[in-house]
Every structure is written in structure tokens, then in C-alpha cells.
Amino acid sequence: MSVRRTMEQERAERAWQAVREVQKEKQKEYLALARSAPADIQNSGLAQTLAFWRAKGDIHHKALYKHVSEWVMERLGAGKGDLLTWITDARTSSDQYRRATVEALAFLVWIKRFAEAEFK
């Protein structure tokens, strides 16, 4: 008998894996970034937030960028590429961009919860 997992269970599992791979010396910074990420996305947009994280280049920015990018690309069936590159591609529709934003925000709920639980 196979057990079908819910989307929330899948998000939670991936978020848990992501949080557990954060380097110990960067956990505090990652937590702060995870806490601010949903508001940053809502205020500036997903593409602008991703671009900011990528430009910063700090370990915790790179880690959260990677975690969100990989998850959203997988969920949208867009392959294993880079989320920011995919978003800025002329063939990406506004509907796909909205779906990517919704999925990123849903995933970040779990990232934030687990980071708060693990890094305090």
C-alpha cells in the first residue's frame, strides 16, 4: 500500500533537509534572512529578492537562494536550472511568475519554522 504525501509534507521534508545543511557558523544569519524573506518578496517581488540574495554572495544568502531556487524549479516542473534565470526568461509568463512566488512563500513558511526551532 502506497501512502500519498501531501504537498505540505513534501515542503516540510525539503525545508527540514535545507535547514539541516546550513553551516553552524551561519545559522544566526540564515535565520534572520529566512524571517525577513517573505516580507522582502511581498514588498519587492520574487525576482528582485532573488537578485539581491545572489548579489550579496554571503554564505547564508547563497544557501537560501539555492534552497528556494531548487524547490520552486522542481515544483513548477521547470527542471534543475536557476530560478532567477528562469523567471527573467522572456518565455516565462506572468502566471508562471505568480505561481513561483506563491510556491516560494509557501516553502519559506517551513524554512522559517525549522530555522527558528533549530537555530535558537
Image (spheres, rainbow, N blue to C red):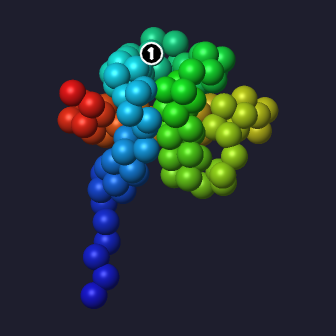
Identify which residue, 21 or 75, lies in the foreground: 21
Q: Position of residue 95 (x, y in %)?
A: 58, 36
Relative height, residue 1 to residue 31 (above, below): below
Q: Position of residue 2 (x, y in %)?
A: 31, 82
Relative height, residue 6 to residue 39 (above, below): below
Q: Position of residue 117 (x, y in %)?
A: 21, 35
The answer to whether residue 109 is seen in the rendering is: no
At a point 66% along the width and 31% down the height, the residue shown is 84
How many numbered circles are shown?
Answer: 1
Give the quarter of the image for residue 40.
Answer: top left
Give the quarter of the image for residue 90.
Answer: top right
Identify which residue, 99 or 115, lies in the foreground: 115
The answer to whether residue 110 is seen in the rendering is: yes
Q: Is residue 39 left or right of residue 41?
A: left
Judged from the image, the secondary structure of the residue bearing numbered disc 1 is helix
Relative height, residue 104 to residue 37 (above, below): below
Q: Position of residue 35 (x, y in %)?
A: 33, 21
Q: Amino acid at mark 1?
A: Asp
Identify which residue, 104 or 98, lies in the foreground: 104
Q: Is residue 113 left or right of residue 108?
A: left
At a point 30% along the width and 56% down the height, the residue shown is 9
Relative height, residue 117 to residue 2 (above, below): above
- Residue placed under numbered mark 1 in the picture: 40
